Image: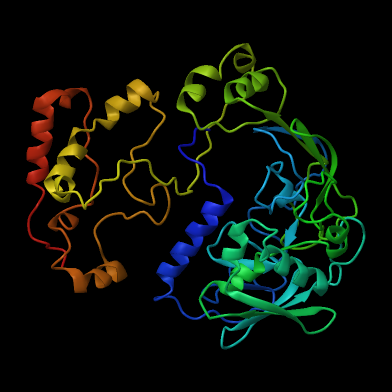
Amino acid sequence: MPRKNQTTPGALAALLLFFAALLATTLPSPVQAAHGVSIDGKLKYPAGFKQFDYTSAHAVRGGDLILHALGSFDKMIPFTLKGTPPEGLAELVFETLAVPSLDEPFAEYGLLAKDIELAKDRMSVTFTLNEKARFSDGSPVTVEDVQFSLQTLKSQDAHPFYGSYYQDISHAEILSPSQIRFHFAKPNREIHMIAGQLPVFSKSFYQAHPFASSDMTPPVGSGPYIVSDFKQGKSITYSRNPAYWGNDLACRRGMFNFNTITLKFFQDQIVAVEAFKAGEFDFMHVNIAKQWARDLQGNSFDSGKIKKELFAHRNNQGMQAFIFNLRKPLFADIRVRRALGLAFDFERTNKTLFFDQYTQTQSYFSNSELAATGLPQGLELEMLQPFKDQVPAEVCPGPARQPAHGDEAAGRGGLDNQGRQADQQGGPAICF
């Protein structure tokens, strides 16, 4: 399906932390929850839940999946700065102390850790490891491995992102053979959840294969897959570990069902599209309107050999927009910004350049439940009250919408008409 943007894992983590900080003044304090934690102490799934709602109890295991990736790879560790790891390595081979559910915000459930205890002063969190947790070589996951992982990711051997991300975790204290406590330099709302995101490495493996080296030895991890074959820079195959320790965990049930997942690497997106049409791999998502509308067609599509489907979703799509520097006197005038907005004919641009594949953004949170709809009311209106003298009058007469153009509004006459309509939308802030 066509997509307008892509988000990297690092950018996504930064975005989540940003909104967590925004919510910090309104959400209640987090509380202890043995099987999981959240930023506000609330969890969708109770202790003893069977599986996530978005997984199926009837999922069938088997089959081989072939995907593609762009670029290349030259290392087997995804947590260092130099070099490029193969896609899928971090998600399929390595595991974290806790994992998020995909159908609730700011919540995590124990994976390698079976119990998570947040201190009342929020200055530490204690993890109790699952005694069944094993690395792919059969060795148990220990608290020493967890401590080693934190120390390694905060060291100069790791990508600088991790040192910054975990900087408020001052140190890890081993309490017993199964318990480890992370101490925080200062309290904040999400630090215990950041701690749960720590990937855990095999200390013995990385003592034999230095973490920051260019060694291409397939890594030992605790995840559901192992690296069974690869051709450096060209392809990699992950095989489901038949002895995977977490098969019966609630946060893993119904997932990771393919016997093998192979990624083939291509240097060029156009070449990858042609390879897909030739049957080189099984599935691809498309984020280029022209490719979706014009390149993905032919006999294989007409015969049904290749299926082209659009899937509706409610994920925030972000935005593509022109951002004005308000420090410039020209753009400081709201009338100038409004005029430029009126002059941009989205409908014509979408039709002539983007094959009618785009939807005009009406919110910073477009396509999600966070997008503003209707007039301010309830808590939203209550929060606006102290600023009612600063809120533009246009907020209240009706929901804010981008100007609509189309063929009839083309030209200077249409622009003038749009401006007159916009000027008529003002008035007193009657919603207060």
Where is residue 237 drawn, in percent x and y? 81, 38
45 vs 218, left or right, is left
> Which picture quadrant has residue 53?
bottom right
110 vs 359, left or right, is right
What residue do we see at 23% from left, 50% from top?
A: 400
| 134 is higher (above) or lower (below) than 191 | above
> Which picture quadrant has residue 277?
top right
78 vs 298, left or right, is right
Where is residue 256 drawn, in percent x and y? 76, 48
| 79 is higher (above) or lower (below) than 17 | above
| 239 is higher (above) or lower (below) than 150 | above
Where is residue 125 drawn, in percent x and y? 65, 80
Colouring used for the render? rainbow
Q: Is residue 306 visible?
A: no
Q: Is residue 431 visible?
A: yes
Quarter that holds the C terminus? bottom left
Total marks in image: 0
What residue do we see at 27% from left, 71% from top?
A: 383
What residue do we see at 20% from left, 74% from top?
A: 386
What residue do we see at 63% from left, 82% from top?
A: 124
Q: Residue furthest right?
A: 138
Where is residue 165 drawn, in percent x and y? 58, 64
Q: Residue furthest bottom?
A: 120
